[in-house]
Amino acid sequence: MTPAAVIARSLDRPPGLDAFWAIWMAHQNTLRQRSLRLSGGNRADAEDALSAAMVRAAQAFGRQPVQNPGAWLVRILHNTCMDQHRRNAHRIPIETDDADLPSPSPAAWVKAAPSPEEALSQQESEAAWNRAMSALPASLVEPLRLHLDDWSDERIAAHLNISRELVRKRRQLAKNRLRLLLDL
C-alpha cells in the first residue's frame, strides 16, 4: 500500500478523494460563476447550490469513471440549481413595503476578497491559461478570444474576413488543443 493510501485510510476518507479535490479546486471559480448565473444573481442561492453540488460530486466521484471532469461538474451543478429552482418555486414571496426597508449601503454589494488559497489557485489557473493560449497559433486564438468576448460568429467572420464555418472550426480546434494543454 502506498504512503498516500495509508494516510488517506488513517484519515477515514477514500483514497480517490484527493483526486476529486484537485479537480474541484481547478474548476471552482468557473463553477461559482456558473452557479451565480443559474441562480439569477442571488449569491446566497448560488453558494447553497455550489455547496450541494460539491457534496453530490464528491459522493459520486468514485462510483464512475469521469472522462471530462469540467463538463461533469457543470452538469452536476446545473442539476443541483434546477432542483433548487423547483424547491424555491413553491415559496410564496413576502410582500413588504419598500419604505420600511433601509436602503442598502454600497458596501453590501462589494465582493469579499478571496482567501489566500483562492487567490493562489486563481493566479495559477490564469498563468496556465495564458501559457496555453500563447502556445496556440494566432489563427486559432483570435476566433476564440472574440467568442469569449461575446462576439457572434457572423461578427467574428466579418472581422477576420473568413467564413462562419471556418470561425467555428478554428474555435473548436483551439478548444481541443487547450483541453490537451490544460489536461482537462
Image: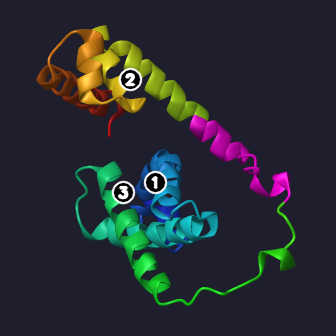
Q: Which residues are magenta?
A: 105-122
Q: Is residue 184 above or below residue 3?
A: above
The residue located at (35%, 14%) in the rendering is 135
Q: Residues within 10 Å of mark 3 (few under 14, many from 20)?
A: some
Question: Dividing the image into 4 quarters, which one contains the N terminus?
Answer: bottom left
Q: How is the image coloured?
A: rainbow
Q: Is any atom of residue 3 visible in this view?
A: no
The residue located at (71%, 46%) in the rendering is 114
- Give the foreground label among 3 and 1: 1
The label on residue 153 is none
Distance between mark 3 and mark 2 Cα atoms: 22 Å
- Most prominent secondary structure in the magenta stretch? helix
The residue at which mark 3 appears reads as 74
Q: Disc 3 or 2, which lies upstream in sequence?
A: 3
Magenta-drawn stretch contains 114: yes
Q: How far from the left and from the top, in percent, is residue 99?
A: 84, 75
